[in-house]
Image: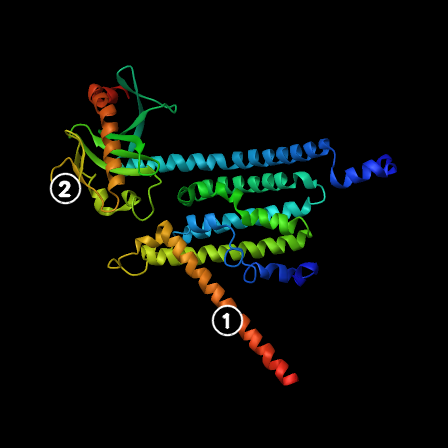
């Protein structure tokens, strides 16, 4: 009201330039409300998102280790594989069949793909030293070309019985048990998978060998 | 433009977004999601629904608060409102359809900078009543969904031989891989724009002819 009594300054100011306090208050309020809504949405969706991720991982473990009935998270601590509950940095999943015999390990690995990091998980049988299955968990490979590493049936067949000795070699025509057929049009992505497997093997196979799976079972 | 000055004509506000002022085919807005995520029909639909939610929600809020928001900070306020809706949509998709969320990836977050959405707030919602704004937003969003779906469906059928993941032509079909790659997006969008402009031109010419005959008859 008092401002209207001073038409010279106040009215022009009111029309074109509201006080900076008002601007700040408006923006803060908007930010605050937005923050509240976001916190609410996050809290509401979080349990479902986590359940989804856990389910995805569980399904992948069962897929890469055929015959698995249950699995146990294992971490490598002090030169030994120990059971772990908490979300440790580096874990593998030991899969057991219905007689509680160790089937093998599901090992997660990641590395550079053609466009972005590829995350995968693969099943490994230590007694036969072969890979028995592989699932890509996360990738951003080119649709129609590189993303064939996820679904291409012929490519996936490579990982049903793949020897890890001396290392996995990507080739155009599979001849030896340690070779994989690359996909035409997705050579880089196929090679990336081989590189990730080799790198992860290098890190994990000696550890898995050093610890005896039988000891693990007695602890249960 | 007569429809805009008439505040009661909600139907006109609604219908103009679908055809006459279609955000994609006529205004050529929102090209980033249009080209990036239309490599399959289901992705296009998911992107369309997320954009629908964000656009209608933002238009509702912006038109509600248009008198409270000072002009100087209106763009920041619009962006805050839009970004809030986008994040909610992002989390919802992640929670309920994680597979689609994975495919759409960063493009859900990029709805924030879809110029179509900010454009509607600045050009329409900030100047019109709540009802008119919602009618306009719903129309525009449906127009956008139709455009996305048209492009996505055509690209999936040609580039993958399937629709909604169901194979259409059997295993002997050799897909035109280029159609689901970025160049296919540009190609198809160009063809669709050509098609829509052709229809527009044919219609205008027909109207002009009709006009001419009418005048002749009167004379």
Q: Is residue A175 above or below residue A72?
A: below
Q: Taking the image as drawn, is residue A33 in sight?
A: yes
**Observer-nearest residue: B15 or A124?**
B15
Assess disc 2: are there few (<14), some (14-19) or many (≥20) residues with their C-alpha within 10 Å of its C-alpha.
some
Q: Taking the image as drawn, is residue B37 in sight?
A: no
Please give the name of the residue rendered at 40% of the width and 53% of the height, measured from the top-left corner: B185
Q: Chain of mark 1?
A: B
Give residue A56's quadrant in the image.
top left
x and y percent of residue A209 in the render? 20, 22
Please give the name of the residue rendered at 52% of the width and 35% of the height, measured from the top-left corner: A42
Please give the name of the residue rendered at 66% of the width and 34% of the height, measured from the top-left corner: A29
Question: What kind of element bears circle 2?
Answer: loop
Which quadrant is home to the C terminus of chain A?
Answer: top left
Q: Is residue A180 left or right of residue B180?
A: left
Residue located beneath label 1 in the image:
B202
Assess disc 1: are there few (<14), some (14-19) or many (≥20) residues with their C-alpha within 10 Å of its C-alpha.
few
Q: CA distance from mark 1 to mark 2?
A: 58 Å
x and y percent of residue A199 in the render? 25, 28
Please give the name of the residue rendered at 57% of the width and 74% of the height, measured from the top-left corner: B207
x and y percent of residue A6 in the render? 86, 36
**Observer-nearest residue: B2 or A67?**
B2
Mark linked to residue A27? none
Q: Nearer the viewer, mark 1 or mark 2?
A: 1
Which quadrant is home to the N terminus of chain A?
Answer: top right
Residue located beneath label 2 in the image:
A174
Question: What kind of element bears circle 1?
Answer: helix
């Amino acid at each position: 009201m008092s401002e209207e009594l001073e038409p010279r300054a106040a009215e022009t100011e009111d029309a074109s330039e509201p006080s900076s306090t008002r601007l700040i208050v408006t923006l803060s309020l908007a930010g605050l409300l937005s923050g509240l809504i976001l916190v609410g949405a996050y809290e509401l969706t979080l349990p479902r998102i986590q359940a989804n991720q856990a389910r995805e991982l569980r399904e992948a473990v069962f897929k890469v280790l055929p015959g698995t009935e249950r699995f146990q998270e294992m971490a490598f601590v002090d030169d030994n594989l120990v059971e772990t509950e908490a979300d440790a940095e580096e874990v593998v999943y030991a899969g057991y069949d219905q007689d509680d015999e160790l089937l093998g390990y599901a090992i997660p690995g990641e590395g550079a793909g053609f466009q972005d990091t590829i995350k995968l998980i693969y099943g490994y049988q230590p007694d036969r030293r072969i890979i028995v299955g592989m699932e890509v968990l996360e990738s951003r490979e080119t649709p129609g070309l590189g993303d064939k590493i996820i679904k291409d049936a012929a490519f996936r067949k490579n990982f049903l019985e793949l020897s890890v000795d001396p290392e996995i070699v990507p080739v155009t025509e599979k001849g030896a048990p340690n070779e994989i057929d690359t996909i035409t049009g997705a050579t880089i992505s196929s090679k990336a998978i081989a590189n990730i497997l080799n790198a992860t093997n290098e890190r994990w196979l000696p550890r898995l060998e050093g610890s005896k799976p039988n000891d693990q079972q007695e602890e249960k | 433009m007569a429809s805009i000055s008439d505040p009661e004509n909600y139907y006109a506000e609604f219908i103009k977004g679908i055809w006459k002022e279609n955000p994609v085919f006529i205004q050529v807005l929102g090209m980033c999601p249009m080209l990036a995520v239309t490599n399959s029909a289901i992705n296009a639909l998911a992107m369309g629904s997320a954009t629908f939610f964000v656009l209608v929600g933002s238009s509702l809020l912006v038109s509600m608060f248009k008198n409270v928001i000072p002009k100087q900070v209106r763009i920041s306020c619009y962006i805050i409102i839009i970004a809030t809706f986008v994040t909610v949509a992002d989390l919802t998709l992640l929670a309920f359809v994680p597979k689609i969320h994975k495919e759409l990836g960063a493009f859900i977050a990029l709805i924030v900078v879809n110029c179509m959405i900010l454009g509607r707030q600045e050009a329409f919602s900030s100047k019109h009543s709540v009802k008119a704004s919602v009618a306009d937003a719903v129309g525009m969003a449906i127009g956008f969904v139709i455009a996305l779906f048209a492009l996505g469906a055509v690209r999936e059928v040609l580039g993958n031989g399937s629709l909604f993941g169901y194979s259409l032509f059997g295993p002997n079909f050799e897909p035109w891989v280029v159609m689901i790659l970025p160049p296919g997006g540009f190609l198809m969008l160009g063809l669709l724009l050509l098609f829509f402009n052709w229809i527009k031109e044919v219609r205008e010419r027909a109207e002009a002819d009709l006009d001419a005959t009418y005048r002749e008859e009167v004379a």
